[in-house]
Amino acid sequence: MDETVKKKVMLSGIKPTGDLTLGSYLGAIRNWKERAEQYDCYYFMADLHALTTRNDPALLRRRTLEQLAQYLACGLDPEKNTLFLQSHVPAHAELGWVLNCYTMFGELSRMTQFKDKAAKNADNINGGLFTYPALMAADILLYQPDYVPVGEDQKQHVELTRDVAQRFNNLYGETFKIPEPFIPKVGARIMDLLDPVSKMSKSDEVGNGRVCIMDKPEDILRKFKRAVTDSETGRCVYYDPEKKPGVANLMQIYSACTGKSFPEIEAEFDGKGYGVFKPAVGEAVVETLRPIREEAERIIRDKAYLEKIYRDGAERASYVAARTLRKVYKKVGLVQK
Ligand code: TRP
């Protein structure tokens, strides 16, 4: 690539509320390795977002670092990507406040994630939970990214970010680049093993329907043996996400782990039934995750290494973020220091 051509910018964040799942690995993080060649990538642990629901402080701290270690283990190169913690770059909270003042009550009220979370946390519907899409807009717009890779569930927030950015630009002149949501196609939606019409959630408490990258092999195998399929006679393995969502999901997972196409998988398990298919998917997942889990365990013990990575990352991120924030403060009429 011609070094004089500026790479397009990509940015994404993940809330450190639990271990990374097989779903986020296959659906997202796995593809982030190659991205670094083509794009200038920023990834951060959205620890400020985590405060919108109640957490045990020690647990939040631990999970934030574990999650960073897991990302590194998934192959994200800290030299080629900017990896940092949201709270280490104060510009997020600062621009978040400003954008709160340019995000409408009506817009925030329409956010489906807010409605879901408010229903689930009826005793703690706090202001942060409501306004957090404005903070997310700040997370994004600070870095002037071209693309924001997110799951389906976050698309609405990226669309809101675009509206807020456009509104600001209309009022004050060109300030923010309007980012595009970027939804990876292959393996994007890995579903819950026990409820294959719902996405494999990382905050699901029960855990038998979801596989985490840190799960032990025996737990992974057990979860796949218990995965929900269907009661079709013949117990045939073929791809029909409408009629056979459980089998379709297992085929997705198997395909993502082995690189085999759906016709190849159908041929491989022709006449074999679910009793052979399910453990085979489990084995493929165990082998895919084994090196990642081992590497994450090694990194989490190396505190000095982790610290160096998040400090360097915050320094690089702060430099870029501060430039945008300065521009915004000036445009809205705050006195410059
Ligand atoms: N809101 C996202 C989630 O719940 C995480 C997130 C925070 C994010 N800030 C972001 C994602 C900025 C993309 C860009 O998963």
Image: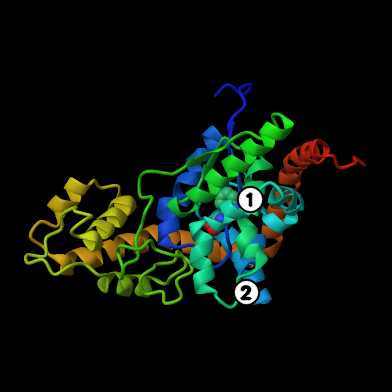
Asked whether disc 1 touches disc 2, contact meaning CB atoms under 8 Å apart, the reply is no
**Which label number is shown at residue 32?**
none
Estimate the x, y position of residue 262 in percent, counting from the top left. 21, 48
Sequence-first disc among 1 and 2: 2
Point out the image quarter for the N terminus: top right
Estimate the x, y position of residue 277 in percent, counting from the top left. 19, 63
Would you say 217 lies left or right of 264 here?
right
Q: Which residue is mark 2?
A: 54
Mark 1 residue type: Met
User: To which quarter of the image does residue 2 belong?
Assistant: top right
Q: Secondary structure at mark 2?
A: loop
Would you say 137 lies left or right of 265 here?
right
Q: Residues within 10 Å of mark 2 (few under 14, many from 20)?
A: few
Q: Nearer the viewer, residue 305 or 178?
A: 178
* Residue 135, above or below 172: below
Q: CA distance from mark 1 to mark 2?
A: 25 Å
* Residue 17, above or below 310: below
Residue found 41% across the figure and 58% down from its top: 23
User: To which quarter of the image does residue 212 belong?
Assistant: bottom left
Front tag of 1 and 2: 1
**Which label number is shown at residue 104?**
1
Q: Secondary structure at mark 1?
A: loop
Point out the image quarter for the C terminus: top right
Q: Nearer the viewer, residue 329 or 269?
A: 329
